[in-house]
Structure formats: structure tokens, C-alpha cells
Image (cartoon, grey):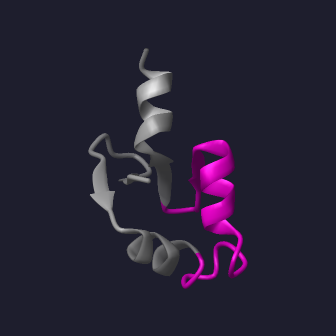
Amino acid sequence: MIILKCYKGEDEWSEISEEEFLDDVEGGGAWKEGTALEALEAVGQISTIWCVYETKEFQRKKNV
């Protein structure tokens, strides 16, 4: 799965690793440990107060 990250208020998306995603989202305390990746896979998008995270597949589908 390819994970993309965008800071809220900005337009530039960057590809990040699964490890970086988990560190940002669960390590930062925004999501309970063991929940964020499962939610991202199920829904395609999650957010924190700082960033929006999407799967590349989710972006492709929403831009069709």
C-alpha cells in the first residue's frame, strides 16, 4: 500500500513509508496503537490535527 501525506492548509502530497505513518499517527498520540493502519486500509483516508493521510488508491478513485 502506498501512503500519501499532506499537511492541512497545503496542497503538496508526499509519499511516506508505513513506519513513518505509524510514527506520525500512533506515535504522536493521535490514534490508539494498532488502529491507524487498519483504519487507513478500510477507509482510504484518515486525519490528525496536523495532516491528512490517504492511500494512493483512494486518491486515484476520488480523482476519477
User: Which of the 4 image quadrants contains residue 25?
Assistant: bottom right
Q: Is residue 32 above or below residue 16?
A: below
Quarter occupied by the C terminus: top left
Task: Tell whether 11 sits left or right of 60.
Answer: left
Report the side of 63 relative to 43 (left or right). left
Q: Is residue 23 above or below residue 52?
A: below
Q: Could you say where residue 39 lies in the image, as x and y percent from the top left?
A: 68, 57
Q: Which residues are magenta?
A: 26-50
Residue 49, how many percent across, how many down?
A: 57, 62
Residue 54 within the magenta-colored segment of the rendering: no
Number of callouts: 0
- Residue displayed at 49% across by 52% down: 52
Query: Residue at the front extreme?
Result: 1
* Residue 28: quadrant of the picture: bottom right
**Up-down: is 19 above or below 1?**
below
58 or 31, which lies in front? 58
